[in-house]
Amino acid sequence: MNDVPDPRGKGSTEILAAADLRKTYGDRVALKGLTFSLDAGRVLGFLGPNGAGKTTSIRILTTILRPSSGWFSVDGIGSDQPQAIRRRIGVLPEGLGFPRQMTAFGYLTYFAQLYGRPAGEARRIATDLLADVGLQNRADSSVGSFSHGMRQRLGIARALVNDPAVVFLDEPTLGLDPRGQRELLRLVQRIARERGTGVVLCSHLLSEIEGVCDDVVIMNAGVVVAEGTVAEVVGASHPELDHVVRIRVPVASIHRTQELLQAFPGIDGDVRSEDSTGWLDVKLHASNGSGADESRARNDLLESLIRADVPVLGFDTGGGRLEDVFLRLTAEAIR
Ligand SMILES: Nc1ncnc2c1ncn2[C@@H]1O[C@H](COP(=O)(O)OP(=O)(O)OP(=O)(O)O)[C@@H](O)[C@H]1O
């Protein structure tokens, strides 16, 4: 019988935990108590508007900065052992520079050796990682010849040379085209699933966080304003988005669509529009009947637009979205 509680407080898969981390710079309080945890094999999105405290948090968790108070652990190693933590983490900083003359293979072999791997093993790690990130055919090309997307993949491979328990990726898709973004995010997800690595992904692109992340931490002005699975954060924080349907039309058709929708029976209040993107938010009357009634109302609404020859570019019935939650929870900072 084993009655000893798990010292890490949760299941044995918890790979990163932070408890009440605080940081002050002089008399400026940058972080007012960061508490969250991440399990192995999961991707956590770390979000917040400018100045929320993300960089400060990541610098603390990657042992670059010491917290003013609080505690964290990586793979069971406490924050009082920063050197041991450094051996168990990988980092892709924003705007990572690369030596242009080096080959991709040489670059990764060099980093594996920096982590103390013997030459033969370092070469094997480099070969495996190049295959993992889809650069095996460019192993002997100089990094200077790589596109931005290829460099980002190489940067992720570099962050994995020490087989880390947790990797921190800062804006990894910045500057990539849509296909490059999607491919890189799939790679990130695969790394988490196949290697069991915990991934902390900082991004300003909320749609990408929503698509790839299992969990999310939203920060605002130094405090965590939401934390949990993406579904929990979206569901728990935004009940007023229930019964909302979002429709996207060409920007030139917004006003006509707005008029058509406004005349549709079953609409609650005004139809709101985002003139720059073509999205319209339509709130349906809360139905007293079953979900099937609401589903029928949504279908009728879509059908009436199509009959009126409105080109419908997007239709979203999910209710809350992470972007709405983010904007609402961080509104104070944005104003
Ligand atoms: N070295 C520093 N000295 C003084 N204040 C700092 C320092 N670094 C950050 N701050 C302040 O701490 C707060 C949090 O900054 P931080 O850079 O962590 O935010 P962030 O969420 O990463 O923002 P961004 O998205 O703009 O990078 C801000 O008010 C910032 O001005």
Image (spheres, grey):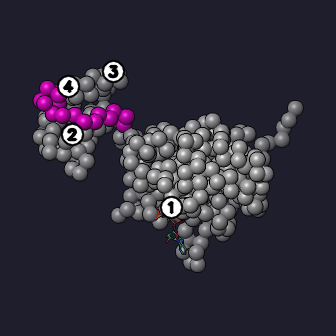
- Among numbered discs 2 and 3, the one appearing first in the sequence: 2
Q: In the rendering, at what x and y percent does residue 38 appear?
A: 63, 46
- Among numbered discs 2 and 4, the one appearing first in the sequence: 2
Residue indicated by mark 3: 292
Amino acid type, callout 1: Gly
Amino acid type, callout 4: Glu
- Among numbered discs 4 and 1, the one appearing first in the sequence: 1
Q: Residues within 10 Å of mark 4 (few under 14, many from 20)?
A: few
Please name whichever residue, 250 or 315, is drawn nearer the observer in this view of the structure.
250
Calculate the distance from the C-alpha at mark 4 to the C-alpha at mark 1.
Answer: 47 Å
- Among numbered discs 2 and 1, the one appearing first in the sequence: 1
Numbered range of the magenta stretch: 304-319
Is residue 132 a member of the stretch shown in magenta? no
Q: Is residue 301 visible?
A: yes
Please name whichever residue, 81 or 228, is drawn nearer the observer in this view of the structure.
81
Calculate the distance from the C-alpha at mark 4 to the C-alpha at mark 3.
Answer: 16 Å
Callouts 4 and 3 close, C-beta under 8 Å: no
